[in-house]
Image: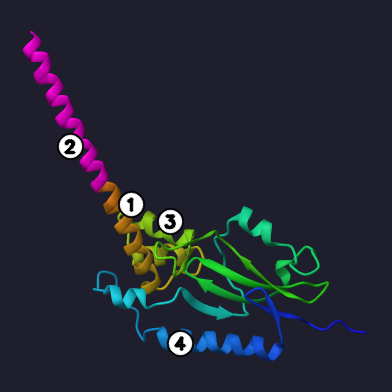
Amino acid sequence: MPKTQSYRWKGKIVTKAVYEKRLAQRKAGQMRRKGSIEPEEGDPVTNETVDSVDDVEQQTNVIDGRRIIDLNVLGQQLWCCSCGEVLSLQYIQNEVRRGLASLFLVLCHKCQVVNEVCTNTQRRTVDKRRVHFDINSQAAFGTLHSGLGWTRLKKLLTCMNIPCPDFKTFKKYEQEVRFAAEEVAEESCVEANALEIQLNEEAESAKKLL
């Protein structure tokens, strides 16, 4: 008897109808959240606007161009969660892009179960309400550190044939990284001031002993 294809949604086996319904709901939600025009670099973006945007930027079954992939993370997931068979990226059924990260839905050629495979490490946000991909935070930090912005990042990635995060997703990660950098800078200033006071006191004590 021919093998029937199985579908998984968030780790659970579901019917084809449920799977397609969930994909349609995700796509509809994405279209509602997506703005009609991306702001130019430097245009004001409020916290409310940035926080309301989901990371999911595009869902497609046509994989084109290059991706930035953590090989260790990818290698650990290339095993079917149902039968344990090695997965092949030739059988990617769908891709959900989240900034520079991707979630591949890979079909097992042996048991026909669809597996979720992430390209990069993830972490919970401070409020524990969302999951962020580290590659997006690192890209935002890199642009701040080098003095670049979203426009130049987009030009660079376009030349490399790598899909660029949309403006709103980038600004969300940039705000997160900027806030963390400001906290570190403030702590460094406090430590530097304390060290300066200590050195001055030691110098005054040394003068009194002379």
| Residue 39 visible in the picture | no
What residue do we see at 77% from left, 72% from top? 108
Q: Which mark is residue 138?
A: 3
How far apart are the two marked residues, 2 and 1, measured between alpha carbons? 24 Å
**Residue 99 in sight in this render:** yes
Q: Amino acid at mark 3?
A: Gln
Residue 97 to residue 181: above or below: below
Expressed as whole percent of the image width and height from the top left, the position of residue 103 reads: 59, 70
- Tell me the CA gap for discs 4 and 3: 27 Å
Vertical placement of residue 208 versus 104, above or below = above
Q: Specify the segment rendered in magenta.
A: 186-210
Which residue in the structure is indicated by mark 1?
A: 145
For disc 2, the marked residue is: 193
For disc 4, the marked residue is: 31
Residue neighbourhood size for the residue with mark 4, other residues' Cα within 10 Å, grouped as few (<14), some (14–19), many (≥20): few
Q: For residue 155, which quarter of the picture?
A: bottom left
**Residue drawn at (48%, 59%) of the image:** 135
For marks 2 and 3, give the one nearer the viewer: 2
Q: Residues within 10 Å of mark 1 (few under 14, many from 20)?
A: few
> Distance between the Cα atoms at labels 2 and 3?
30 Å
Q: Earlier in the sequence, mark 1 or mark 4?
A: 4
64 drawn magenta: no
How far apart are the alpha carbons under marks 1 and 4?
33 Å
Looking at the rendered image, the disc whose residue lies closer to the viewer, 2 or 1, is 2
Q: On the rendered structure, is 158 left or right of 85?
A: left
Quarter in which the N terminus is drawn: bottom right
Q: Earlier in the sequence, mark 2 or mark 1?
A: 1
